[in-house]
Amino acid sequence: MVPALFWMGFDVKLDQFLEPVMLMNLIFLGLGASALCFATWNYAVKILGSVKTIIYIYMVPVITAVTSALILHEKMTKAMICGIFLTLLGLFLSEDRRKKERKN
């Protein structure tokens, strides 16, 4: 994203990165959102295998939509419900196909 900053007219100064809020955001993104997630993803692949782990990645939008409705009381739109349905349908179809291939 750094090259895009210059094209989009952002005025980035080095002293902005020394502000406590900005510094803590960068530390969180570097350690929490990047390093920790990468480590847990690799651990999940090691335990479950890549195919099963990918299923969980496809479930993230479904879990996010349902959680936002339950916890944040956001309204479920028709597009969200349609997206959830299509995601689950795709997961079920892909799992069914793999079971048929294993039998052959």
Image (tube, rainbow, N blue to C red):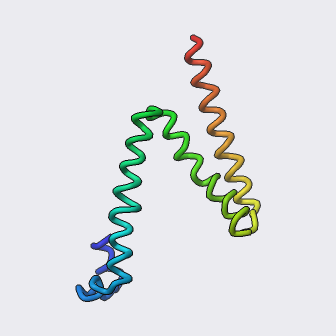
Q: Quadrant of residue 79?
A: bottom right
**Where does the image place residue 57, in percent across and percent down from the top left?**
52, 46
Q: Residue at x 51, y 34 (%)?
A: 52
Please state if 70 lies on the left or on the right of 36 as rendered: right
Above or below 74: residue 9: below
**Where does the image place residue 48, in percent across and percent down from the top left?**
47, 33
Give the quarter of the figure containing the N terminus: bottom left
Of residues 30 and 58, the one nearer the viewer is 30
**Where does the image place residue 96, in percent across and percent down from the top left?**
64, 26
User: Extreme left residue here?
Assistant: 14
Of residues 100 and 44, the one nearer the viewer is 44
Q: Please count the marks in the image.
A: 0
User: Extreme top residue here?
Assistant: 104
Q: Residue at x 23, y 85 (%)?
A: 14
Q: Residue at x 64, y 52 (%)?
A: 62
Q: Quadrant of residue 74?
A: bottom right
Please state if 67 lies on the left or on the right of 38 as rendered: right
Q: Quadrant of residue 80?
A: bottom right
Above or below 36: residue 6: below
Please state if 79 lies on the left or on the right of 104 as rendered: right
**Where does the image place residue 64, in percent across and percent down from the top left?**
62, 58
Of residues 24 and 45, the one nearer the viewer is 24
Give the quarter of the figure containing the C terminus: top right
Q: Residue at x 61, y 30 (%)?
A: 95
Above or below 65: residue 57: above
Of residues 41 and 9, the one nearer the viewer is 41
